[in-house]
Image (tube, coloured by chain):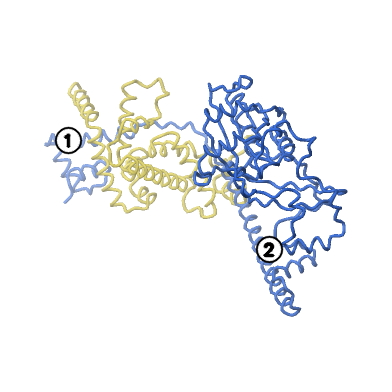
Chain colours: A yellow, B blue
Amino acid sequence: MAQKPLDDLTLIRMCRGGSTDAFGVLVRRYQEKLYPTVHRLVGSADDAEDVLQDAFVRAFERIASFHGDSSFYTWIYRIAVNLAVQHCRRRRVRKAFRFGSDPPDASRRKAIDPGIDCDPSLSIERRERELAVCRALDELCPEHRAIVVLKDYDGRRYEEIAEILKIPIGTVRSRLHRARGELRRLLAPLVESESTVSRASALST
Amino acid sequence: MPSIDSILNDYLDDRLDADTRRRLEAALDVDERLRRALQSLIEVRELVAVLPRESQVDVAPQVLSRISRTGRAARLQAIAGRISLESRVAVASALAASILIFLGSVAVQRYFRIDGGPLFVANRLMTAIGARPPGPARPNPDRDPVPETTPAAPTLGIVALRDDETAGDLSLTGRFLDHPQLDLRLIIDGNSEVAARVAQVISQSTRYNFLQLKLAEGLVIDPKCPAPAEMYAVALPRQDVVMLRKRLQAAVGPTTVRETRFDPELATMLVETVSPHAFRPHPRADVFIPAGNLALRLENPLPRGADPLPPPSDAEPSEPTPEQYRSAPITDPDLAHALKSHKGTAPEQSRPPLMPGPGTNPPGQARGSQPGDTDRIIVIVWVSRTNG
């Protein structure tokens, strides 16, 4: 008879008792669920792993402050997203300090990791499209990127986003509008061609 | 008033009230531009939504490692805090003890009227209680092994004289190289390091200014020593030549110090060929106390760094003869007192002669000598540069 896995609250109680093994179970349970969001927020796989590590370490250090009002995943998700946004802000400040207000150069574009290069089953066209979207996301400021990723990539509701980022719902709404408008401008060639294909397919049907 | 884009975004996210939603849908039915604007927003949203969700990651080992390190660091920090507290207590105690000892020594000094200052009294007090008095540590022969003496590597450079101190190098060179007592050459094969050690030894072995002469590559004045050379012309009391030779041998290690006569022809060629530099001596004291043959020898009246070979003058001899040394009255009261209280003074006839006897004269002694420098000879130390 297979042993029933321990639930989050039991593991958290064990963590509070000093069991790092119990926390290891929590890490393995949620790391793959958190990683894509963090990856989209920070833009590169290496940075995403670093931020994810920081998030779990931070969670372990503050495990005593987790009261179970929300699920552990919501709690760690909130920590990871905020650390990712903070990471993007620091990186932006460093780049601004180093390069001034220059537009993104080739090296910056090269650093963007869509996370699909190793998948040969994807068509070249799709890869290029996803790479373009990742570049466009990287052009956004961290706050706008966070809103777009949480809403359009993770499908979070406005209220959840407001709770996670600790901002009013009105701010979520206005930022999302601006971020989508900026993305539409950045992805104009892609969107136009998509629109053309859509119209053509609509006419043919 | 909200913009069209804002309303379209709200429509997209289903956040419009029913009335606004109905009116917008009516407008969309008739407005192609509005439909295209909404379509572009939908496509942007879809482009983001369909981005891959790769998740092959395992950060658990790193996280657990960091957690364990953090825990260890926290424990170490706590220990460090305790050590720091203990250290502070220890330092404060030591400081308080030092202040008490100092104040006590001042009180003792004033009460007993002891000369020597508070530090002297503190030393006495600390010695009495078994602590080591402040100041440099002195070796304890019972406890500390006596280190073996090894030839010290040269650490001090030789100091060149200024032009105004030498009154012209050429003049000094002439007085060295034309001197009738120039008859001894010590030849050493070595590199620049050996030459530096030789220079150091020479500066420590003479009390007079000495010369350095460099024979550059390609200049050959002695076919027996064709290599580039560094030469040192140094004036010494004749009896110090043996000591110079020993010191050189000790300094240059396995290299043999060869001793030959210095050909006067070479001196002439040297004067014409090389450019000399004068240097100041750094005499090092060697104390010899033969137990069975104690003798008192007065200090040489010539000051340190003096011109070894002043221009010849018949009128006034530059230095008293050994007989004059012995017969001169003692003017120093401390020395007279020391002599009076010294009962073991050897008889006068047992003192070593300051001048070598006739049988010990080197070959060059036969040539003419100048007044005042009869006991000094000029030695050329010739460092033949083998490499480097």
Quarter of the view holding residue B227:
top right
Q: Is residue B55 left or right of residue B70?
A: left
Q: In the rendering, at what x and y percent does residue B126 appear?
A: 76, 66
Determine which residue is flagged by label 1. Answer: B35
Task: Please report whichever mark, 1 or 2, sits nearer to the chain's N-terminal start.
Answer: 1
Q: Residues within 10 Å of mark 1 (few under 14, many from 20)?
A: some
Q: Quadrant of the C terminus of chain A?
A: top left
Q: In the rendering, at what x and y percent does residue B127 appear?
A: 78, 65
Element type where label 1 sits in the image = helix
Res. B90 mark: 2
Chain of the residue on which disc 1 is drawn: B
Task: Check disc 2 and give the amino acid type.
Answer: Ala
Between B169 and B199, the one nearer to me in the picture: B169
Between A204 and B198, the one nearer to me in the picture: B198
Residue B107, relative to residue B17: is it above or below? below
Residue B117, relative to residue B363: is it above or below? below
Residue A69, relative to residue B131: is it above or below? above
Q: Residue at x 39, y 45 (%)?
A: A90
Q: Residues within 10 Å of mark 2 (few under 14, many from 20)?
A: few
Same chain for labels 1 and 2? Say yes or no.
Answer: yes
Between B54 and A156, the one nearer to me in the picture: B54
Res. B309 mark: none
